[in-house]
Image (cartoon, rainbow, N blue to C red):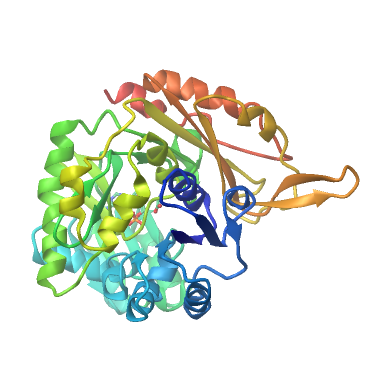
Amino acid sequence: MKVLIVGSGGREHALIYKIAQSQQVEKIYAAPGNGGISDLAECIDIKADDVNGLLQFAKDKKIDFTIVGPEAALAAGIADEFTKNGLLIFGVNKSSAQLESSKVFSKELMQKYSIPTADFKVFNDSFKAKEYLKQNSFPCVVKADGLAAGKGVVIVKDYTQACEVVDKIMEEKVFGDSGRMILIEDCLQGDEASIIALTDSKDIVVLDSSQDHKRVFDNDEGPNTGGMGAYSPVPLVDKSLLKEIEDQIIKPTMQALVKEGIDYKGVLYAGIMVTKDGPKVLEFNVRFGDPETQAIIPRIKSDFLELLLSVAKSNLGEFLENNPLIWDERFCVCVVCASGGYPGYYEKDKTIKGLEKIASLEDTIVFHAGTKKIIDKTIQKEQYVTCGGRVLAVSSFGKTIKLAIENTYKALNNISFENMHYRKDIAKKALSLK
Ligand code: AMP
Ligand code: GLY
């Protein structure tokens, strides 16, 4: 089978790493891929959201199955176009992608179907939003409706800061059209977890839990990033809590989408806050998490390609009856190494050293994100250099979370590039969350 993976991050490297293990795979293409991906797949120079370019490529190369990583391609309708042209694809269609691309759509759906989430109000007028804020309590959360590369959510501490954020989003339009509407939400307290499920609109499989680390510095300080590390499973989310999340959030959301006439086939990712009143939804995403995938995928023992195929072919239930998902019971911790300056303006073209040392380590995998492979002419050798903010992630296993943490940092110590930075406290919370 010829498989095309759309995307270029660590998440896509993890998907390709796993899919390459399937007996069914004959050739993998990645669009556009990255340095590490190019070791496993042929990288092609087509952007992830260039739907027409990808469609043409898939037709020309007679691709049997396409798997989509990032949300932008899904929101641009890649699944609709491929399906219309008779091509098999894993990824939700455009109307399903609204669950991520419009926070107003997602919150109104949750309200209509009583899915637990923070109370909220929607505004399309900055004056009215500010009037409402006068009698609101703080902290509260201001969110732009549309996609904003993870930067459209601000927890505000007082009225003045809230008004500044409202003006930035609605008047200065820093996120363009994504800020035409905003949400003002109650601020939830608790611990966060990412719960990622796959569904074909009839059946659901909930993957093991994971937890992201969004802030750039240790102890959750500094600005938000795409994610600086993750681990799986999360001790806080024990079997009974996972079942509660499945029964009260994942299944009702899938059923709500079906009732709304949406044919939802793909990833249903719930960002959850575990509050003292139970789990509540912070947000939904319609794709695998990054870097959560880099901590979850190494733990999956089953043929992941077959699982994704069963979702795309709408026979997930039947598939799972004969092929229950098998997990490596160990913990996996993933730490992201980032470029100097990230999440702000960052440096590029730094040589990455030590990758060969880490390649021989058992139970450690390096997933590339912002890397590219070049030929160093002076030594006539291939080398990887940095070309993105999040450069790569190191994932290691451990029988206990403590061992997984130790193994990951020990492996990571082999790697270096100029001004590399990473968090030193990934998964530390799990040690006290038992
Ligand atoms: P979102 O993109 O909606 O997931 O928001 C990004 C991050 O903002 C979440 O992972 C939370 O850390 C935080 N956040 C979002 N909504 C809330 C809320 N209602 N209460 C507290 N924190 C929130
Ligand atoms: N790690 C958070 C996300 O993928 O949205």
Above or below for 21 versus 236? below
Nearest the eye: 366 or 303: 303
Q: Quadrant of the N terminus?
A: bottom left
Q: How many marks?
A: 0
Q: Position of residue 83 (x, y in %)?
A: 33, 76
Left or right: 265 in relation to 225: left
Above or below for 410 versus 38? above
Q: Position of residue 385 (x, y in %)?
A: 72, 48
Above or below for 362 versus 276? above
Left or right: 372 in relation to 272: right
Left or right: 273 in relation to 383: left
User: Is any atom of residue 242 visible in this view?
Assistant: yes
Q: Position of residue 72 (x, y in %)?
A: 43, 68
Identify the residue at image location x=50%, y=60%.
Answer: 7
Q: Quadrant of the C terminus?
A: top left
> In the figure, residue 146 lies in which quadrant?
bottom left
Identify the residue at image location x=23%, y=34%.
Answer: 237
Identify the residue at image location x=48%, y=51%.
Answer: 226
User: Is any atom of residue 172 visible in this view?
Assistant: no
Nearest the eye: 299 or 22: 22
Q: Position of residue 168 (x, y in %)?
A: 45, 70
Identify the residue at image location x=23%, y=42%.
Answer: 323
